[in-house]
Image (cartoon, rainbow, N blue to C red):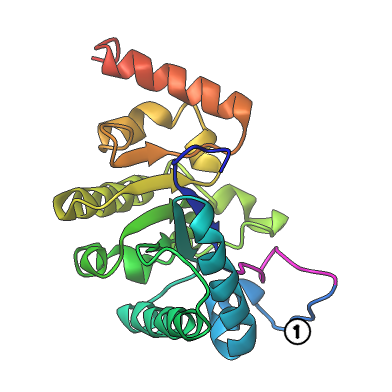
């Protein structure tokens, strides 16, 4: 209500890896970043996922609400989540509880397998957000929480920028909104490169930084580039 019609994005439960909850036990895994986390965990706990979807749908009566799925690795997972969302909608219809039938469904693009098929993914979703932290670590095969391999986590690697550019181009062609999030989104040095890749140009492409100060710095650099200073 306070955002006055602007969209609010709710990400479904995104725990596992470096994110834990004191009241929700997670399996002990050798590599939790590649294990049961985020959407995989929700699929394995359908009642938990159902509760989230119902709550989000019911909140949608207060304004424009979008639902975003983290850790998606295939089109099949998107279709499975869509089916569960439709089930939640049908339950609310039967219970005569109001919700917005036009709630948008999007995904986090943080697994390279999804990024390289962005042309196939874009028609399946309403929007996407490129999660640069996980995308970089999966692309570089580096555990970003492991201090022994910190130097191998290269957020300026040309492969990462090339992949981001490909995803942005495919979503622009599909006319679907896409944004950048994660540490790269709040990095002023990366902002001109991201703008050059098409991010920040027009209402469909946005950069989401990690904090107010970072967002202000990024916005200033984007304004300079847009004014022609960057040329």
Residue 21 is covered by the magenta coloring: yes
Is 17 colored magenta in this rendering? yes
Q: Nearer the viewer, residue 76 or 162?
A: 76
Percent of width and height locating residue 57: 51, 68
**74 vs 161: above or below:** below
Image-based side of 47 in relation to 43, left or right = right
Q: Position of residue 211 (x, y in %)?
A: 62, 34
Foreground residue, 22 or 194?
22
Most distant residue in the left direction = 173
Quadrant assignment for the N terminus:
top right
* Quadrant of the rendered image containing residue 43: bottom right
At x 68%, y 58%, the residue is: 145
Residue at image coords 79%, 81%: 25
Q: Write down the region rendered in magenta.
A: 13-22
Rendered position, 77 above or below 206 = below
Residue at 20 percent of width and 48 percent of height: 172
Residue at the outermost front position? 96
Which residue was labeled with disc 1? 28
Asked if residue 60 lies left or right of residue 145, the reply is left
Whether residue 76 is visible, yes or no, is yes
219 in relation to 61, above or below: above
Identify the residue at image location x=64%, y=82%.
48
Q: Is residue 223 above or below residue 17?
A: above
Q: Is residue 231 left or right of residue 6?
A: left
Q: Position of residue 90 (x, y in %)?
A: 43, 84
The image quadrant where one finds the C terminus is: top left
Q: Nearer the viewer, residue 222 or 81?
A: 81
Q: Secondary structure at mark 1?
A: loop
């Amino acid at each position: 209500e306070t955002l006055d019609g602007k969209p609010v994005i709710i990400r479904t439960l995104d725990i596992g890896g470096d994110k834990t909850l004191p009241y929700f036990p997670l399996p002990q895994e050798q590599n939790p970043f590649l294990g049961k986390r985020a959407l995989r965990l929700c699929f394995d706990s359908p009642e938990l996922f159902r509760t989230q979807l119902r709550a989000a749908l019911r909140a949608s009566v207060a304004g424009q609400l979008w639902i975003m799925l983290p850790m998606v690795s295939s089109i099949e997972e998107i279709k499975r989540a869509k089916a569960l969302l439709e089930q939640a909608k049908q339950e609310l219809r039967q219970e005569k509880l109001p919700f917005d039938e036009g709630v948008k469904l999007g995904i986090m693009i943080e697994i390279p397998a999804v990024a390289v098929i962005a042309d196939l993914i874009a028609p399946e979703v309403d929007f996407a957000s490129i999660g640069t932290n996980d995308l970089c670590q999966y692309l570089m095969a580096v555990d970003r929480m492991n201090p022994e391999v910190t130097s191998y986590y290269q957020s300026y690697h040309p492969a990462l920028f090339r992949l981001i550019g490909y995803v942005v181009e495919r979503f622009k062609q599909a006319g679907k909104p896409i944004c950048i999030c994660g540490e790269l989104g709040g990095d002023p040095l990366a902002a001109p490169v991201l703008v050059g890749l098409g991010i920040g140009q027009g209402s469909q492409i946005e950069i989401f930084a990690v904090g107010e100060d970072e967002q202000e710095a990024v916005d200033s650099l984007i304004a300079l580039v847009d004014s022609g200073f960057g040329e």
